[in-house]
Amino acid sequence: MFDYDPYLRLSKFPLIWCAGCGDGIILKALIRAIHKVGLTQDNTCLVSGIGCSSRLTGYMDFNTLHTTHGRALTFATGVKMARPELNVIVVTGDGDATAIGGNHFIHAARRNIDMTVLIFNNFIYGMTGGQVSPTTPRGKKGSTAPYGSFENTFNISGLAEAAGASFVARTTVANATQVELYIKKAIEKKGFSLVEIMTQCPTAFGRRNRLGAAVDMLRSFAENSVSISKARSMTAEELEDKIVTGVLVDTDRPECREEYQKLIESVRQS
């Protein structure tokens, strides 16, 4: 049996996450991925912003930064530029990353700076009051949309792809093995690597929208997930309300920090 304890700050337990929250599934998958890649606690820095997902850094016994709302990627960029030998992993949520942090998200992907970004997409601001986020599905309720959201939603993975990320994958906590696999692939990939992980919030989102217990939300993820290979043969109508999972982007592009170092060397020689 895998021993998670050496990677955790056990003094910070018990967790503050609600019963049935999927964030614990991601935490364990992240630890397993880090272990398999062979990263050490000293050569790895975990950075988070504000929100339920961002509490993860407090539970993991690594170099960690729990930063301000929406600014996790800016802090992580500074860490990577100043200490390029560190493996930088960012933990953030759909609201933290794509609302207040949206512009930082776009430009971190555009620069293609070498870091792994895990976005916990639970379709809601879970910790700060249940407000709708940029990924709340149309018609679903939040504290700021008691009659249902009328807005279109962000395609987080599509946004990262369009902005220029080197690696983009999407999965759900209903498949913990796949979560672990994609995190491992993201860590191993040079450049801006994103894993969008759909996870349930049974408290702020599930109760308000009458989606049942956490296990019902997990079952819904499993039943409505479609692999990217299968999705290619499906119509737009068939893909309505489906979650397309898989590796969406895996390409090689110039990496920001390396290009910056080349510029420094060229200026020195001129």
Image (tube, rainbow, N blue to C red):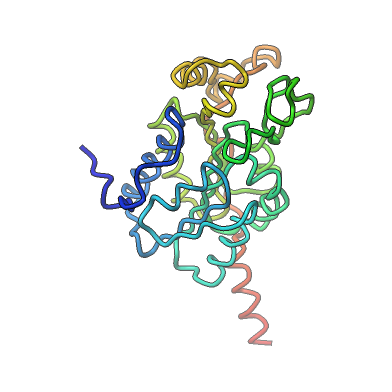
Q: Residue 54 at what x, y percent from top left?
A: 52, 47
Q: Residue 186 at what x, y percent from top left?
A: 48, 46
The C terminus sits in image quarter: bottom right
In this view, which residue lies farthest toward the right?
150
Q: Residue 25 at what x, y percent from top left?
A: 40, 34
Q: Is residue 250 visible?
A: no
Q: Is residue 88 above or below residue 25?
A: below
Front position in the image: 2 or 194: 2
In this view, which residue lies farthest toward the left?
1
Total numbered labels? 0
Q: Residue at x 50, y 60 (%)?
A: 65
Q: Determine the image quadrant of residue 41.
A: bottom left
Front position in the image: 54 or 153: 54
Q: Residue at x 44, y 51 (%)?
A: 188
Q: Residue at x 78, y 28 (%)?
A: 151
Front position in the image: 218 or 206: 206
Q: Residue at x 38, y 39 (%)?
A: 29
Q: Is residue 145 above or below residue 108?
A: above
| 251 sits left or right of 161 in the view | left
In this view, which residue lies farthest toward the top?
238
Q: Is residue 268 above or below residue 69?
A: below
Q: Determine the image quadrant of residue 253.
A: bottom right
Q: Is residue 89 visible?
A: yes
Q: Is residue 264 above or below residue 16?
A: below
The N terminus sits in image quarter: top left
Q: Residue 50 at what x, y percent from top left?
A: 58, 49
